[in-house]
Amino acid sequence: MTIALWIAQGLLAAVFLAVGITKLKDDRETYAAARPPMTTYASRMPVWLFRTVGVLEVAGALGVVLPWTTGIAPVLTPVAAAGLALIMVGAAVDHARHGESASYPVNAVLFALAAVVALGRLLGW
């Protein structure tokens, strides 16, 4: 199970680091046009929320890997994974409100990975 958790942590870190950095470097309109309908939500968000989500995604990406790897405050790994799961819940709710059902599978997979990492690391699987 340890190998599976590390794979899930690596995938989460890679995805959320890439997406978070993109949210921090691009403006909302550029991001929204990148991969519609997956990214169109960005044009509906206030700038402060768009940037905040980017910061939270980068922090979560680092948090699912670094504390467990270094052994420094490893309890932060499941906390970061739970935070990423909550971001996916918020994303799914927003997509549902706007009828963007094509985004559901991505939200579901990322939520599931984050939930497995959070539970796995918290319960010591």
Image (spheres, rainbow, N blue to C red):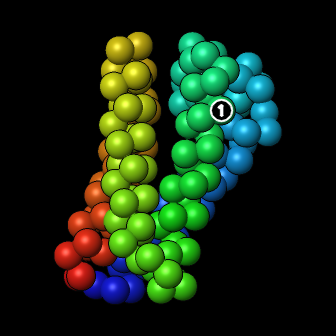
Image quadrant in which the C terminus is located: bottom left
Asked if residue 32 is positioned above or below residue 83 in the image, the reply reads above
Which residue is located at x 39 percent, y 50 percent? 83
- Coordinates of residue 75 in the picture (x, y in percent): 36, 72
- Coordinates of residue 88 in the picture (x, y in percent): 39, 41
Image quadrant in which the N terminus is located: bottom left
Residue furthest toward the left? 123
Label 1 environment density (alpha carbons within 10 Å; few <14, some 14–19, many ≥20)? many
Depth order, front residue of 63/26: 63
Q: Is residue 110 left or right of residue 52?
A: left
Asked if residue 30 is positioned above or below residue 114 in the image, the reply reads above
Q: Is residue 31 left or right of residue 79?
A: right
Amino acid type shown at disc 1 = Arg
| Image quadrant where residue 122 sits | bottom left
Residue furthest toward the front? 73
* Residue 3 is at least partly visible in this image: yes
- Coordinates of residue 91 in the picture (x, y in percent): 42, 32
Which residue is located at x 43 percent, y 59 percent? 80
* Residue designated by label 1: 51
| Image quadrant where residue 41 sits | top right
Which residue is located at x 30 percent, y 75 percent? 121
- Coordinates of residue 72 in the picture (x, y in percent): 50, 81
Which residue is located at x 73 percent, y 19 percent? 29
